[in-house]
Each structure stands twice: as structure tokens, then as C-alpha cells.
Amino acid sequence: MSRRRHQPKPGDLIKVKRSVYQHWALYLGDGYVVHLTSADEGIRCLSGSSDPIMRKKAKVKKQLLKEVVGNNAWEVNNKYDRSYTPLPVEEIIRRADSYIGMEMTYRVLRKNCEHFVTMLRYGKSVSDQARNAIVGIGVLAQSASSIGFVISATLAAAAAPLGAVAVAVVGAGASVLAATFAALKLKFRRL
């Protein structure tokens, strides 16, 4: 059975608490929501993926809130109202209606369901979920780069007794590893 904080009003953002991620929808009224979901009818919804550059086809659908929520907990969550002014409700609903049935590109970190519904409500795409994932990836890349440096220094020290050629080969490998981590960190900083 789904749980909710309070009864939604047209234009409200709905956060659905899935096991590993949050799915977002926008309440239209009369029990219906609009949300970004998989274009493949066989897949119920798009999930957060470990692939940060994942691109999938998505479709904007109008469905009953109870169908979208299923047995998951949900709540009205207009948390961005503190930072952004919502558009007039009539405009939010008109914008939402204009997208129903459209196929769109879905990208976990740039064009996800939260980006979509915040664009409808505020005229600006925002996603704390994606922002937090990007920060996490940046921390992971920084940690991996540090670990790569320690490993390369250890390998170079171990190769030293074998002579200058072995140290040069290990050093070149470490440089490639460090460059790879630096490129990864730069890529996610741009997202």
C-alpha cells in the first residue's frame, strides 16, 4: 500500500521512493500524473543506472498516480520552491499536456525524470539526485587517481632493482593510468 504526506494539487511534484532511486512525476489532477518513463512498453520505468552516460529512449506518459506508484511510498515534494518560483498552475499543466506521448532522450545525469518535471514546474531542469551522483563520481575519480599514484609509486620502487628500463616502463604505465583518471574527473566535472 502506498503512503503519502498529503493530497497533491495540480502542478505538484510527486517523489516516488523506489528501492535504489527516486522516480518523479507531476500531478495533473483527478488522480493523474505525467512522468518520463521507458519508451519500451515492456519496461515499467527507467531506473538509475551505474552507467553515467546512459542514453535511452523515454516517453512522456499520462497515467494514474496509483499505477505509477504501485506499492512504493510517495510524497508531494515541491522542495525546489525554496529556490525557484513555480510557474502558474495553468501554464504547468499546459506544458505537461503538450509533452504527453512524446519520445525523448533519457540520460541519468542530465535528462532524467526529475529534470523533466522540474522543467515543467519551474521552467528550469534541476535534479538533486543527479547532482549528488555527479559529486559521488567526482569523489570516486579523485580517490581512484590517488590510489593509482600510490600503486604506480609502489611498482616503480619494486622495479628499481631491475634497472632503469623497468622503472621507465612502470612509470609510463602509471602516467597512462593517471591521465585516464584525470580525463574521467574532467568529464564528470562538465556534467
Image (tube, rainbow, N blue to C red):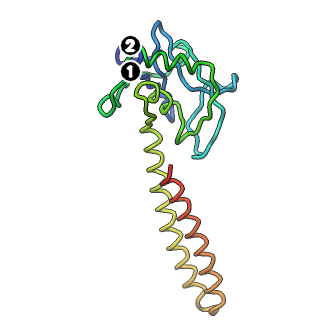
Whether residue 157 sits left or right of residue 83 in the image: it is: right
How crowded is the residue under tag 2: few (<14 C-alpha within 10 Å), some, or many (20+)? some
The answer to the question of whether label 2 and label 1 lie on touching residues, with beta carbons closer than 8 A, is yes
Residue that carries the numbered disc 2 in the rendered image? 9
Question: Could you classify mark 1 by the number of other residues whose Cα lies within 10 Å: few (under 14), some (14-19), or many (20 or more)?
Answer: many
Q: Looking at the image, is 118 positioned above or below residue 129?
A: above
- What is the residue that sits farthest to the top in this orientation? 30
Horizontal side of residue 85 vs 61, given as left or right:
left
- The residues tagged by marks 2 and 1 sit, at their Cα atoms, a distance apart of 9 Å
Q: Is 15 drawn above or below residue 149 in the view shown?
A: above
Residue 76: % across, % down: 38, 21
Q: Residue placed at 57% from the left, 69% from the top?
A: 179
Q: What element carries label 1?
A: strand
Q: In this view, does 118 lie to the left or right of 183?
A: left
Q: In this view, does 191 lie above or below 120?
A: below
Disc number placed over residue 23 in the picture, else none: none
What residue sits 59% from the left and 81% below the top? 171
What residue is shown with label 1?
76
56 on left or right of 178: right
Q: Is mark 2 on a helix, strand or loop?
A: loop
Q: Which of marks 2 and 1 is nearer the N terminus?
A: 2
Instruction: Check disc 2 and give the amino acid type.
Output: Lys
Q: In which image quadrant can residue 160 be found?
A: bottom right
The image position of residue 34, as x and y in percent, is 52, 19
Between 183 and 124, the one nearer to me in the picture: 124
